[in-house]
Image (spheres, rainbow, N blue to C red):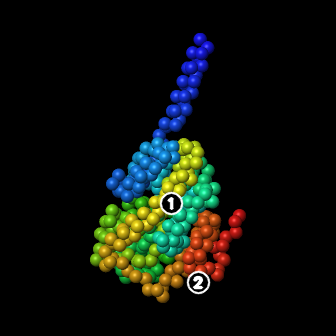
Amino acid sequence: MMPWSKTLLLGMSLCAVTGVAQAKQVMCVFDLVGKSGDVFTLMKDYQLAAKNWGADIELRVGQNESVIAEDFKAGKCDAISVTGMRGRQFNDFTGSLDAIGAIPDLKLAVKIMQGLASPTFAKHMVYGKYEVVGVIPVGDAYLMVNDRNINTVAKAAGKKIAVLDYDEAQKIMVQQIGAQAVSADVTNFGAKFNNGQVDIIGAPAAVFKPLELHKGLGSKGAIVNYPILQVTGNIIIRPDKFPAGFGQKSRDWVKGQLPRAFGILGKMKADIPAKYWMQVPAADQPGYQKMMRESRIDLTKRGVYDKRMMKLLWQFRCKEDPKNFECSLQDENYKQS
């Protein structure tokens, strides 16, 4: 009788072990377009790669980012792919990459993201019960206006600007320039611009075609060719649901995809007809930089942006352009608390 019970116990424990190993991890993916979108396509590649790191991921795509974030908190998703602004609630550090004016162009953004994938930053990727296992560029965000006469900050006063209702930074900045904030979400800000409910939006080139933003620009509108911030994407997991060491393997893989992403995003910008672009005179650019810098410092003081990330981005910018006026200033050289 005794060997029997031992065999039974062994069989049960083996089942338990294999059961754990075979449990699928549910990843909820936000893609504006749904299953035919670029993000979902990239996540299918990720799903395949993750098999090599011991994970069996089941992808679920959704077009409502707010619902995805809430499902993640509720434990209905073991992992998510969302925008950095939405991801900020799960990790302040990576969620501050899209701070206003903090990364002046996509090329530098890719360089920074490659750096952040290093094991040196692994401790900053874990925040409570969540871990950021990949940061992806979505591209420079540009201001799009329905009237090209809105060509200075002063002329934006009184105009209606779409702001993402969960992003404190946008609300504060719109207030500062005297414009009117109109609450929006990633899913409807394009429609609000296209049907004239708002005069100005900020958006990356990647959404120009899927959201048909040419409708909102009409014949008088323009895209201001001066990046205001970098839009990022985050892959975030609950590490307890994944094999040990998964996070670093994932970050390494994402790092390898960055040059490809850079090429795709460059093409998306190039595909926007030249007639829509409005250049910012070189003489006006330092003024914009100063204004964005002041906003960024103010928002960091208010606790919206993470000081560690702000210091790191300042160091990256000044390594890239040491002669820039901000490099002799110490405001963003935050002391580590």
Q: Is residue 49 visible?
A: yes
First reached walking from the N terminus: tag 2 or tag 1: 1
Residue type for callout 2: Lys
**Residue 169, can we see it?**
no
Provide the secondary structure element on which disc 2 rests.
loop
Instruction: List x then y, in percent, for residue 219.
Output: 28, 77
In percent of width and height, residue 122 lies at: 61, 56
- Residue 58 marker: none
What type is the residue that disc 1 sits on? Answer: Lys
Horizontal arrangement in the rendering, residue 66 relative to residue 300 (left or right): left
Q: Position of residue 50 (x, y in %)?
A: 48, 48
| Residue drawn where x is 52% and y is 53% of the image | 250
Q: Determine whether the residue tagged by mark 1 lies in a helix, strand or loop.
A: helix
- 76 and 37: which one is in front? 37
Residue at the disc numbered 2: 323
Question: Hey, which residue is sitting farthest bottom in the picture?
Answer: 283
Crowding near pointer 1: few (<14 within 10 Å), some, many (20+)?
many
Side of 187 where 104 appears, left or right: right
Placement of the C terminus among the 4 image quadrants: bottom right
Q: Height in image: 203 above or below 72? A: below
* Depth check, front residue: 118 or 287: 118
**Percent position of residue 305, x then y:** 58, 65
Front-lying residue, 214 or 11 = 11
Residue located 56% across and 53% down the image: 248
Residue under the image location 45 percent in, 65 percent down:
259
Check disc 1 and report the residue beneath it: 255
